[in-house]
């Protein structure tokens, strides 16, 4: 019988009892969704990636990426950029807020518009600059919170330099590494290289959190067994399914994971929308030209695709998602989809969500 257990991890001054993380995902991991995942058993969450330049220039929209719903803990904040001074200034700003459990440097985003200008995964092409960013960020926070790094195994198949880059950031003071087992060039396609993740874990003294290739809850424990990592970070496998984290906890407790009931799905969607409206209501009128309710409905749309894709009536709702709908109209349509019932496996060839964290 496989062992379903995890050990706590210490990341600098942060002690994590359950090292299962929700990955930062642009357009998805705002406070409304993160808080739902925490309530279902996620061990720690991270903001969407936040532009360092936007923070130091005090862009209101950028600042809202730091908004939380309720008392989200443990909550990390992830910043991106390629100028060491700007990254350090943004880090100092974040440390002064005293609201976050750790600060993560993004060196793994594979989106072309990010990586091609040297941000995100583009930093892997310049290990010395990446180490200098970590060094300056570490100095800027002055020990107020741990500094971590999220990265990949390399830029492309011909440039797999993760042992070099992670050695540099460890020497620069990083206190943990979140490592995705694919190169940036393939983005999210193909297998995740767990063997190389294991090699990095053996080489580093700081905690290494594995990422990539996690689909079923049991894969969390399999990755830990096979690679020796100190924890696991998951991404889009949890979208539309915050209960995924409950399933991981259930396995560890000797309980069988179970599919959420229709009533649980309905309650989660209703609560998710309510929290989105709460978050939007905190913003100024100038930012909310459409109003808090309509904006919240728009923000919820990509989540609805994930919550409801396994129901027979989802196609009818999907054709109307581009329309502007108030909360009452949107929730009425959600209820109609839920009433249509779930598809059988043979009816739902897209039910397996690709691993895209």
Image (cartoon, rainbow, N blue to C red):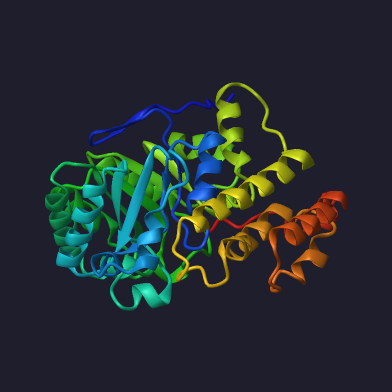
Please indicate, yes or no, whether residue 29 appears anywhere in the rendered image.
no
From what the image shows, is residue 184 above or below residue 213?
A: below
**Residue sitting at 66 percent across and 44 percent down?**
268
Q: Position of residue 63 (x, y in %)?
A: 35, 61
Taking depth in this image into account, of 165 and 235 the one nearest to the observer is: 235
Q: Position of residue 97 (x, y in %)?
A: 26, 48
From what the image shows, is residue 259 above or below residue 324?
A: above
From what the image shows, is residue 249 above or below residue 149?
A: above
Taking the view exactly as shown, the residue that stands out farthest to the top is: 254
Taking depth in this image into account, of 98 and 130 the one nearest to the observer is: 98
The quarter of the picture where residue 244 lies is top right
From what the image shows, is residue 287 above or below residue 170?
A: below
Q: How many marks?
A: 0
**Residue sitting at 57 percent across and 66 percent down?**
291
Please indicate, yes or no, whether residue 285 appears anywhere in the rendered image.
yes
Please indicate whether residue 76 sits to the left or right of residue 43 in the image.
Answer: left
**Residue sitting at 36 percent across and 51 percent down?**
179
Taking the view exactly as shown, the residue that stands out farthest to the front is: 285
Please indicate whether residue 281 sits to the left or right of residue 250 in the image.
Answer: left
**Residue sitting at 69 percent across and 73 percent down?**
322
Please indicate whether residue 197 sits to the left or right of residue 135 in the image.
Answer: right
Taking depth in this image into account, of 133 and 325 the one nearest to the observer is: 325
Q: Position of residue 151 (x, y in %)?
A: 34, 57
């Amino acid at each position: 019988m496989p062992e379903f257990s995890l050990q706590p991890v210490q990341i600098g001054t942060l002690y994590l009892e359950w090292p299962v993380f929700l990955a930062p995902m642009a357009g998805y991991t705002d406070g409304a969704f993160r808080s739902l995942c925490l309530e279902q058993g996620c061990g720690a969450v991270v903001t969407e990636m936040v532009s360092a330049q936007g923070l130091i220039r005090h862009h209101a929209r950028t600042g809202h990426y730091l908004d939380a719903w309720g008392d989200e803990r443990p909550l990390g904040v992830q910043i991106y950029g390629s100028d060491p001074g700007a990254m350090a200034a943004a880090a100092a700003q974040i440390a002064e807020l005293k609201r976050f459990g750790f600060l993560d440097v993004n060196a793994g985003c594979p989106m072309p518009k990010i990586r091609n200008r040297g941000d995100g995964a583009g930093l892997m092409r310049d290990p010395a600059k990446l180490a200098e960013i970590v060094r300056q960020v570490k100095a800027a926070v002055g020990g107020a919170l741990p500094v971590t790094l999220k990265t990949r195994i390399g830029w492309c198949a011909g440039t797999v330099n993760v042992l070099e880059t992670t050695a540099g950031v460890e020497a620069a003071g990083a206190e943990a590494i979140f490592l995705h087992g694919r190169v940036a060039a393939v983005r999210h396609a193909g297998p995740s290289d767990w063997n190389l993740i294991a090699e990095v874990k053996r080489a580093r003294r700081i905690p290494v959190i594995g990422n990539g290739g996690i689909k079923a809850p049991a894969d969390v424990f399999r990755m830990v067994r096979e690679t020796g990592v100190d924890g696991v970070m998951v991404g889009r496998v949890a979208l539309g399914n915050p209960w995924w984290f409950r399933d991981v906890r259930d396995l560890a407790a000797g309980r069988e994971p179970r599919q959420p009931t229709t009533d649980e799905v309905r309650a989660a969607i209703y609560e998710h929308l309510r929290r989105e409206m709460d978050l939007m209501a905190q913003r100024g009128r100038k930012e909310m030209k459409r109003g808090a309710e309509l904006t919240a409905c728009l923000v919820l749309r990509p989540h609805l695709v994930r919550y409801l894709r396994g129901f027979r009536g989802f196609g009818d709702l999907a054709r109307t998602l581009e329309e502007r709908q108030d909360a009452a109209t949107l929730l009425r349509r959600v209820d109609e989809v839920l009433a249509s019932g779930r598809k059988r496996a043979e009816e739902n060839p897209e039910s397996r969500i690709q691993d895209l964290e």
